[in-house]
Image: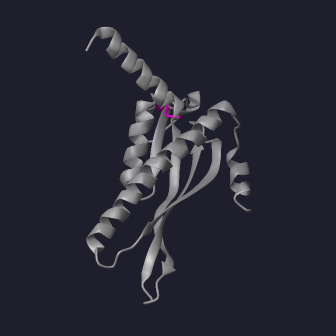
Amino acid sequence: MSRPFRISLLLLGSLALGACGFHLRRSASLPPSMQHLHLTVNGGGKLQRSLARTLYASGVDVEDTSGPGIAELDVGTAQFSTDSLSINGSARVTEYAVRYHVEFLVKDGSGNVIVPNQQINMSREYSYNAGDTVGSTAEVEELQRSLTDDMVQAILFRLQAAARHPQTVSPSAALMDHSH
């Protein structure tokens, strides 16, 4: 292939990707008070690993321990649940929903709440085949992996919003805010 033809193909491919809405994800732009951050996820697991990796890729120093001058991202709740959605004529479940519920808050290095308690709920639905229980288990695991990836992005979007619209809530006001 000639060089001009290859360049034309590359340019055409780039334009097609841009036209369909595809955009490369950039690293998150977080508030300066979050540049040194201690991450705590109740139960740890895949969410903690994915979130720590993504924060690190965004230039955040994810610290092993908390301390003065280190912000705290505390994910107090991160739980999956499965609900049945439909039942066939033989009283067998044919559709399920995998739900993911996460609650978190962020405090700066002085203990002031900079992102008040946030709740994010996500779900995915899937059809269940009673004759293929192994495939169904793998499908649920893949849905949970996908939900974890999407949850990391949703948390980062909330943290970026805090960077664009900074507000600090005193610790005592944050305690009173949990009443509703």
Quadrant of the image for the C terminus?
Answer: bottom right
Residue 75 vertical position relative to residue 131 in the rendered view, above or below = above
Q: Is residue 158 left or right of residue 123?
A: right
Q: Is residue 90 left or right of residue 111?
A: left
Kindly identify the residue that appears in the image at 71 percent across and 37 percent down: 167
Magenta region: 21-25
Quadrant of res 64: top left
So how many labels did they put on this image?
Answer: 0
Work out whether residue 26 can be spotted: no
Kindly identify the residue that appears in the image at 32 percent across and 16 percent down: 6
Q: Nearer the viewer, residue 167 or 128?
A: 128
Residue 90 vertical position relative to residue 166 in the rendered view, above or below = below
User: Horizontal and vertical percent for residue 169?
Assistant: 70, 43
Kindly identify the residue that appears in the image at 69 percent across and 59 percent down: 178
Work out whether residue 11 can be spotted: yes
Kindly identify the residue that appears in the image at 36 percent across and 14 percent down: 7
* Prevalent SS, magenta region: loop
Residue 124 vertical position relative to residue 63 in the rendered view, above or below = below
Q: Nearer the viewer, residue 85 or 161?
A: 85
Q: Nearer the viewer, residue 47 or 64?
A: 47
The reply to whether the magenta stretch includes residue 23 is yes
The reply to whether the magenta stretch includes residue 68 is no
